[in-house]
Image: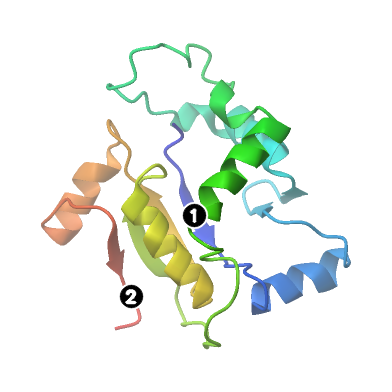
């Protein structure tokens, strides 16, 4: 997968960031919404965002050594499991069904911290998903440093924290 560091601004229903995007782009704005500060590109729609990220940042591709099916021989193409359009949307929706909407609505109004929190995680970890849901419900912006298998970020995390167990949350405000 891509080895990117991403800043998330939670857009759960009722969040200040969702309100900002709707005010800027109109009431028909959809989520997810991506803003790339490196290229000034802004876009909606999951499939478009995934394709853009792989096309633009494929040099950050990390081959997971446990993936034996060589699905990603062309690093500029996202895995087919991420680009099935309506099928992907339905399957993602079904995975959320059992979580009863966790992460989709603001649970508590909070003031954003001066600096975003730092979440060391990997996209596919269920424990990381639970932490991201909480951060979303609490409207806490955070930078996710991706640590998939094979990523140099694993060693960076160990060097900075003395451990490697993800998810790991740091608060630079304390």
Q: Quadrant of residue 9?
A: bottom right
Name the foreground residue: 58 vs 121: 121
Q: Quadrant of the C terminus?
A: bottom left
Give the percent coordinates (x, y) of residue 11. 63, 67
Task: Assign a secondary structure to mark 2.
Answer: loop
The spot of residue 52 in percent (x, y) is: 67, 35
Q: Which residue is mark 2?
A: 172
For the N terminus, give its image quadrant: top left
Q: CA distance from mark 2 to mark 1?
A: 33 Å
Mark 2 or 1 closer to N-term? 1
Q: Is residue 170 above or below residue 76?
A: below
Residue 89 appears at what percent x and percent y? Answer: 66, 40
Identify the residue at horizontal 47%, vertical 82% (top origin).
Answer: 114
Residue 121 can be seen in this image = no
- Residue 129, compared with residue 21, is above or below; it is above
Judge from the rendering whether residue 23 lies leftward or rightward of residue 6; answer left or right.
right
Q: Nearer the viewer, residue 157 or 135?
A: 135
Residue 45 in the image, given as x and y percentages of width and height: 74, 45
| Residue at numbered disc 1 | 98
């Amino acid at each position: 997968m891509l080895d990117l560091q991403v800043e998330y601004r939670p857009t759960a229903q009722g969040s200040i960031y969702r309100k900002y995007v709707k005010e800027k782009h109109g009431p028909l704005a959809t989520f997810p919404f991506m803003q790339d500060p490196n290229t000034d590109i802004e876009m909606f729609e999951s499939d478009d965002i995934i394709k853009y990220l792989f096309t633009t940042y494929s040099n950050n591709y990390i081959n997971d050594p446990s993936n034996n099916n060589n699905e990603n021989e062309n690093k500029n193409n996202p895995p087919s499991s991420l680009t099935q359009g309506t099928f992907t949307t339905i399957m993602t929706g079904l995975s959320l069904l059992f979580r009863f909407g966790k992460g989709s609505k603001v649970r508590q109004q909070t003031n954003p911290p001066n600096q975003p929190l730092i979440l060391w995680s990997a996209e596919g970890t269920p424990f990381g998903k639970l932490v991201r849901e909480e951060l979303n419900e609490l409207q806490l912006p955070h930078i996710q440093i991706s640590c998939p298998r094979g990523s140099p970020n694993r060693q960076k995390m160990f060097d900075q924290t003395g451990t490697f167990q993800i998810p790991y949350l740091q608060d630079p405000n304390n």
